[in-house]
Image (spheres, helix red, strand yellow):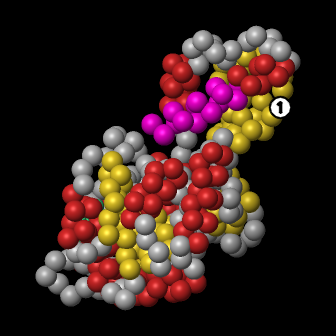
Amino acid sequence: MKVIIMKELLEANDRLAEENRSYFKENHVLCVNLMGSPGAGKTTLISAIADELQDIQIGVVEGDIASSIDADKLEQKGVHSSQINTCGECHLDANVIRQGAEEIAMKNGIVFVENVGNLICPAEFDLGETVRLLAASVPEGDDKPYKYVPMFSYADVVALTKCDLKEAVGFDTTYFTKGLRAISEAPIYEISLKKGQQREGIKELAAFLRKKYEEV
Amino acid sequence: MHELPVVMDIIREMDEQASAHGFHKITEIELVIGELSSIVDESVQMYFDVASQNHPCENAKLKFAFEPAMLKCRECGNEFPHEKSFQCPKCGGDAMLVKGSGRSFYIKSFDGE
Ligand SMILES: Nc1nc2c(ncn2[C@@H]2O[C@H](COP(=O)(O)OP(=O)(O)O)[C@@H](O)[C@H]2O)c(=O)[nH]1
Ligand SMILES: [Mg+2]
Ligand SMILES: [Zn+2]
């Protein structure tokens, strides 16, 4: 006898994510889930945003397969960090985020969650964040929104990083934007943070996040 | 590899359903997987084969139904399932993702005896 149940899966994570959302709200924290491939420039981006938003407390929950290099780097800069090693897991879920957030115990500020470098798995997992920030770097190619539809459709804002490399890799910004616009209305910030060069685009992205923080 | 926890949820749900319906065996489970859900059917199958041992749903056949994301043409309003292109098959216009479509992941039905 066939029984129809229409039982949603992933419910357990979504419930925890909602709890995290209220936890962040009560503590007046803007939680930013930062996703992107390994090497897309996520850690560099957090560090540059912290420079721009000196008057706002910044915290980081670092998700990494095994090391704590990124957390150490940011901690040296005065960004309060906690490290979650996923031991091979491909993404962070709502449960571990709560542990990380409680460890840094932040009130009134912005907490970045640097997700595991991966364009596939993190897309499905709501962490209870307010803003989903996707770092897509120029050398990855202008066709990524066409290939990674879940991830790009999930983003609230896209940081197009390493724009200083556009010419070198022949990046077609119009094609990239067209692909993104088919699946998302997320604003795009074009950013360049090459060491030893004038920084570009980071003030605008920082201002966007400041506004989101003020809305919490 | 993020499929393991959801497979455990499926097995737990089937344990409960089996006892609620007085089935000693679950023979088939129908799962709906949205294109944008980041769930891979082969991984679900792989974890299920191992984790369902000694549960009523051991050896149950998993049937996967895929649900594409839907796109809506900005020019003519035509709605069509996403296959490869973001272009409208009717008029060639640019299309836009229908919000929320293709995200599901759920157990639709099961069969037992
Ligand atoms: N040319 C260039 N390199 C960058 C830029 N941003 C980051 N990088 C470099 O890219 C590499 C990876 O950056 P990182 O922030 O560690 O990436 P993550 O793995 O996403 O955290 C580092 O060597 C950075 O110095 C940029 O805007 N331009
Ligand atoms: Mg990093
Ligand atoms: Zn059309």
Q: Image point 63% across, 59% down: which residue? A: A18
Q: Residue visible at 54% across and 36% down?
A: B5
Q: Does residue B43 belong to the magenta stretch?
A: no
Mark 1 residue element = strand
Whether A78 is drawn above or below B82: the answer is: below
Quarter the N terminus of chain B occupies: top left
Counting other residues with Cα less than 10 Å from the Cα at mark 1, is it few (<14), some (14-19), or many (20 or more)?
Answer: few
Between A38 and A163, the one lying in front of the other is A38
- Residue B61, located in which quarter of the rendered image? top right
Residue B81 seen by the camera: yes
The furthest residue to the left? A196
What amino acid type should be assigned to the residue bearing mark 1? Answer: Ile
Q: Position of residue A166 (x, y in %)?
A: 28, 74
- Whether residue A41 is visible, yes or no, is no
Q: Quadrant of the C terminus of chain B?
A: top right
Image position, residue A44 (x, y; %) = 27, 71
Q: Where residue A152 sits in the image (x, y, percent)?
A: 50, 62
* Stretch in magenta: B1-14
Q: Main secondary structure of the magenta part?
A: helix
The structure residue drawn at horizontal position 32% and vertical position 56%, both measured from the top left corner, is A83
Q: Which residue is mark 1?
A: A4
Please name whichever residue, A211 or A82, is drawn nearer the observer in this view of the structure: A82
Relative horizontal placement of residue A164, taking residue A108 as reference (left or right)? left
Q: Chain of mark 1?
A: A
Q: From the viewer's side, name the closer residue of B33 and A128.
A: A128
Residue at left offset 32%, top offset 80%:
A50
* Foreground of the two, B93 or A192: A192
Query: Can you say whether B108 is above or below A213 in the image?
Result: above
Residue A98 location (% of width, % of height): 49, 56
